[in-house]
Structure formats: C-alpha cells, structure tokens
Image (cartoon, grey):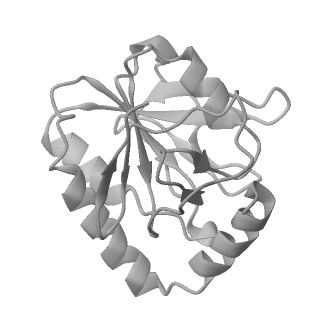
Amino acid sequence: MKKKDIRIAFKKKRDKLSEEEIEDKSLTIANKLLELPIWNYSFYHIFLSITHLKEVNTEFILHILNGKDKNAVVSKSDFDSLSMQHFLLTDATPLKANSWGIPEPMYGIEIPAQEVDVVFIPLLAFDKKGERIGYGKGFYDRFLKECKDDAIKIGLSFFEALDKINDTNVNDIGLDYCVTPEKIYEFNQ
C-alpha cells in the first residue's frame, strides 16, 4: 500500500475506537514501555495527544516520566516553516491548543533537539522494518534529523505493523522501537 491509502485506512480504524478503548490501549502501551531499556536517560520528548484525532493518550507516559524524575520535553509547531521548537514541560508551563487542536507550550525553557535522548513519536501506521507514516507534513522527520545520532526513536501505535510501506523515501527516518497494546517491535536501523 502507498502512504496516502494507508493514512486514509488508519484514520478510519482510529475513528472506530471508543474513548474506553483508547484509554485501555494507551495504558497498556505505557506499561509496555517500562520493559524497554530506555530509563537511564534525562530528556524525553513526548507529544501531547490530539484528542479529536484519537491519538495514543500520553498522559500515562507523562506520569511514568514524572515518577522516574525525568525531564519531559514538548513541542510547539510552526506551520509556516514546518518546524518545531521544544520546551521543558514543568508545572509552570502554560499549554494552549493551536488551530489544529494540538496542545502546545505557549512559552518556557527551550531545550535544543540535540539534548533529547528519547523521542516518543505519534504515527498512523508503521511496517515491520520500522518505517512509519504520520500525517504527512514531515515535522518529525525534520526534528529527528536535528537530534543526536543515538537518540532513541519510539513509535506508539494502537495497531500492529504492516508488512511493508511501499513508497518510503530517503528523508523518512525510521523507528528503533514501536510499542502497541499487543507487542514491542524492535528494529535495527
């Protein structure tokens, strides 16, 4: 399948999930993350879920990060340059939904992409090689290119891996892991 068709199909699959299913699956994903060897780092970039798009609820992961005394980093998107600015998430960080419904920091302590150790990545679908499909704007591909080479890239998905995404390109940055309610996928990039 091609990316365009996969996006349409997986948006439809997510639309069919109830709020209860989203919460249950999100909690299971968060608990599975505890099995990964990723908890000795300092800076964890996490997306704040877009509720109306039925993304994985990352509140559970934020609780884990807080309980482990880790630094959570969140982004503010610039839709003109298709880039992101990254901020430390603290109790004092004011959040506001942008025009796309993405909760974002209004301002705060800026964290350079090179400081990020682990990145939790929103996605619509992924394949058995660790290739991923997001919403198609390339925000995360640009951001991941700015991160240090050994930053750990973890996709979060309600659904299992596709066999193959047919139209990947050289600008696509793959995953190191993807966690679903059923399984942890590990990829050798």
Q: Residue at x 26, y 68 (%)?
A: 28
Identify the image quadrant of the N terminus. bottom right
**Residue 59 visible in the shown view:** yes
Residue 171, horizontal then vertical, whole percent:
70, 28
Q: Residue most toward the right?
A: 80
Question: Is 177 placed left or right of 93 in the picture?
Answer: left
Above-or-below relation of 116 to 77: above
Residue 86, horizontal then vertical, whole percent:
53, 26
Q: Nearer the viewer, residue 67 or 154?
A: 154
Residue 141, horizontal then vertical, whole percent:
64, 31
Q: Residue at x 56, y 67 (%)?
A: 51
Specify the quadrant of the image occupied by residue 8. Answer: bottom right
Q: Nearer the viewer, residue 79 or 176?
A: 176
Q: Residue at x 21, y 58 (%)?
A: 32
Q: Nearer the viewer, residue 151 or 112?
A: 151
Residue 103, horizontal then vertical, whole percent:
58, 50
Specify the quadrant of the image occupied by residue 46. Answer: top left
Q: Residue at x 70, y 42 (%)?
A: 168
Total numbered labels: 0
Question: Is 53 placed left or right of 38 in the picture?
Answer: right
Above-or-below relation of 126 to 71: below
Identify the image quadrant of the C terminus. top left
Q: Nearer the viewer, residue 88 or 172?
A: 172
